[in-house]
Image (cartoon, rainbow, N blue to C red):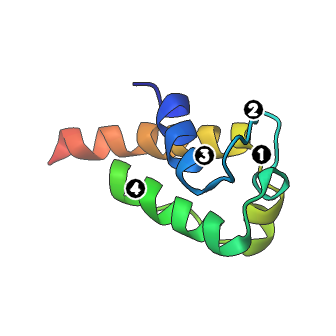
């Protein structure tokens, strides 16, 4: 599965039933509150074994595209470190 598909699955667990969103949808505009966003971040970190920056202001204005990009960036930075180990 792609990062986008994985994140969409994680978000849909917390989003209100019937929610639809695209890459430019802000997380808070699709019916997620700040606690939902924090729980989503924790689930993403657990799934990918990465650490995402914790900034409430950025999380509130983050789009689905932003989140996908951030995870992909963290994964790209993680790969060289794993190769060294």
CA neighbours of label 1 inside 10 A, class few (<14), some (14 to 19), many (20+): many
Query: Which of pointers 3 and 2 indicates the residue nearer the eye?
Result: 2
Residue that numbered label 1 is attached to:
63
How far apart marks 1 and 3 lie (CA) works out to 11 Å
Residue that numbered label 2 is attached to:
23
Q: Residue at x 35, y 59 (%)?
A: 46
Q: Position of residue 50 (x, y in %)?
A: 40, 55
Toward which corner of the image does residue 49 lie, by quadrant? bottom left
Toward which corner of the image does residue 56 lie, by quadrant? bottom right
Residue that numbered label 4 is attached to:
50
Residue contact at pointers 1 and 3, CB within 8 angstroms: no
Viewed as shown, does residue 64 lie left or right of 49? right
Q: Position of residue 80 (x, y in %)?
A: 31, 39
Query: Which of pointers 1 and 4 indicates the residue nearer the eye?
Result: 1
Query: Which of pointers 2 and 4 indicates the residue nearer the eye?
Result: 2
How far apart marks 1 and 4 lie (CA) works out to 19 Å
Toward which corner of the image does residue 14 lie, by quadrant? bottom right
Residue that numbered label 3 is attached to:
70
């Amino acid at each position: 599965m792609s990062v986008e598909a994985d994140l969409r699955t994680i978000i849909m667990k917390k989003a209100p039933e019937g929610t639809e969103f695209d890459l430019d949808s802000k997380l808070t505009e699709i019916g997620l509150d700040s606690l939902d966003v924090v729980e989503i971040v924790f689930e993403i970190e657990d799934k990918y074994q990465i650490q995402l920056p914790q900034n409430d202001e950025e999380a509130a204005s983050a789009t689905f595209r932003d989140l996908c990009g951030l995870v992909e960036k963290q994964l790209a930075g993680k790969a060289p470190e794993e190769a060294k180990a």
